[in-house]
Structure formats: structure tokens, C-alpha cells
Image (cartoon, rainbow, N blue to C red):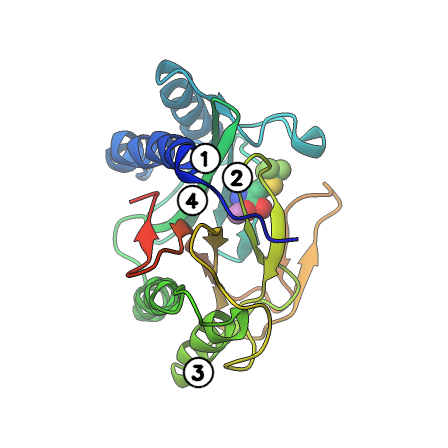
Amino acid sequence: MILIKDQDEIQKVKAACQVVAQVFREIEGQVKAGISTLELDALIEGSIRRQGAQPAFKGYRGYKHASCLSVNAEVVHGIPGSRRLSEGDVVGVDIGALLNGFYGDAARTYAIGQVSGQARKLLRVGEECLELAIKQARAGRHLGDIGSAIERHAARAKFSVVRDLFGHGIGRSLHEDPLIPNFGMGGQGAELRPGMTLAIEPMVNAGGSQVLTLSDGWTVVTADNQLSVHFENTVLVTENDPEVLTK
Ligand code: MF3
Ligand code: CO
């Protein structure tokens, strides 16, 4: 069942989302060559806690960190560790916060220094996929309109979307109904209504759509070892334009 949030619940989801947005503002300058992913995770956790919130991912199904940091061919759920970011990498930074019983969730992918032309194009297209998807998050549209916008934009660029992982509703739980595929057919799937809060999160691969999970049980990588990017915002469906809560 897709939960419709009332004004009070919307304000609380928004407050949790604003914690995440503030973390991104604080860490942006630190996502650079030389920092280890564990150090970056510590900055993220510190920022979340200073804001009076809790890291949503820590403890989730036994996950031990505040963020997922996914480098190059890692798609999502990369585990922070001793690896240091270096020039030419792309790193996906996925952050969730829990505040006053409600969740916010967002991800951005960053270039470390100068990256390849292909990486730059993939970053641009991935971000555009999220923007186009958000434009479809309107009352009366369907989940398939979101997925279709993402899939078509990626395909136009000769990239592919991950088909094994999904966006999701969000609120009192990090993951609520509905599942939000990054592919689909316009007009198909559940109809969107005002008060739905959706975490829309395209994962776009430079090569094929196939992914694998490493033996650590978390890290999802592209099967062909090509680059992948991930962009996510938590979005409110309204009577009018969609509202991006994690901006
Ligand atoms: N942001 C991810 C999502 O939307 C959550 C990562 S899984 C976790 O599903 F274990 F890190 F929480
Ligand atoms: Co998410």
C-alpha cells in the first residue's frame, strides 16, 4: 500500500531530507583525491549527528556505516573502507537520515578531478535521468512514466539502466511501497497522488545493465566492470509541481 502523508508527516519527511541536503553541502569540498572512503563516511556521520539526526543506514540489515560509497564500477552499496579516492574516479555518495521518526534519502555521484570524457557524459546523463524522472512525479501520472523517462534517456545516450534495484517510497520507513523501477512503460503501474513521498534513484551504467553483488554481501558492481553512476532525491508529489525535498 502506498501511504499518503498528511501535512505534519510531510514536514517531518522534509526535515529529515534537509538533514541529508545539509550533509551534501558540508562534504562536497571534501570529496576529493586522497580522502579514504572511511574518512568520508566519518564526515557524513558527524554531520548527520551534529544536526540531531541518526544515520539511517547504520544498523539497517546489519550495515555498519552511515553512507554507501560506490567507486567506478561499483553501482551502489559500496562499503566505506581504506580505499582512497584518486584522480579520475567517480564516486557515488548515498546518504540517509532519520529525524523525529521519519527518513530522508539522497545520492549524488561526483567526479574526482579530471575524469574521462565517457565518465563526464555518464555523470551528465545520470543526473538528467533523475531530473526527467522527477518531472513525471505528478498527480495523475503513473510509476511507469517515471521508469520510462529514465530508461529512454539512458538508452538515447547508448547507456543502460540497472534493472535489479529500485527506487522506493519513504516515510516512517526507509523503504515503503511502491517499488520504483528505473524502466517501464508510460501510463503503466500505480497512479501517483498528492502526499506520496518517493525516493527516485536511477542507476545508469556505461555498458550493460547486468550487475553482481560481491561476496561482502553488499557491494553491487557492473558485470562488465564498466562505470556506473547513481543519483537520488526524495520527492513529494503535490497538486502542482513535484517538490524535491533533498535539494
Ligand atoms: N539508499 C539506499 C536505498 O535507497 C539504502 C542503502 S542500503 C543500506 O535503498 F544498508 F545502506 F542502508
Ligand atoms: Co534510496
How far apart are labels 1 and 3 at the CA level?
40 Å
Instruction: Give the foreground label among 3 and 2.
Output: 2
Q: Which kind of residue does numbered mark 2 sit on?
A: Gly
Q: What amino acid is found at the position of numbered circle 3 in the picture?
A: Lys
Q: Nearer the viewer, mark 4 or mark 1?
A: 1
Rate crowding at label 3 as few (under 14), some (14 to 19) or many (20 or more) other CA atoms within 10 Å.
few
The residue beneath circle 4 is: 106
Q: Which residue is at 56% across, 34% downward?
A: 172
Give how far across and how far down residue 121 sits, in percent. Answer: 32, 70
Comparing labels 3 and 4, the label whose residue is closer to the camera: 4
Mark 1 vs mark 2: which is more N-terminal? 1
Of the residues under marks 4 and 1, which one precedes in the sequence?
1
Residue 158 marker:
3
Question: Mark 3 CB in 8 Å range of ligand 2?
Answer: no
Earlier residue among tags 3 and 4 = 4
Mark 3 in CB contact with mark 4 (< 8 angstroms) = no
Quarter of the displayed picture in which ligand 1 can be seen: top right
- Asked whether mark 2 lies closer than 8 Å to ligand 2, one says no
| Amino acid bearing label 4 | Ala
Kind of residue at badge 1: Glu
Kindly tell me whether mark 4's CB lies below 8 Å from ligand 2: yes
N-term-proximal mark, 1 vs 3: 1
| Secondary structure of the residue carrying numbered label 4 | strand
* Mark 1 residue CB less than 8 A from any atom of ligand 2: no
Q: Which of the 4 image quadrants contains residue 238?
A: bottom left
Rendered residue at 49%/64% (across/down)? 192
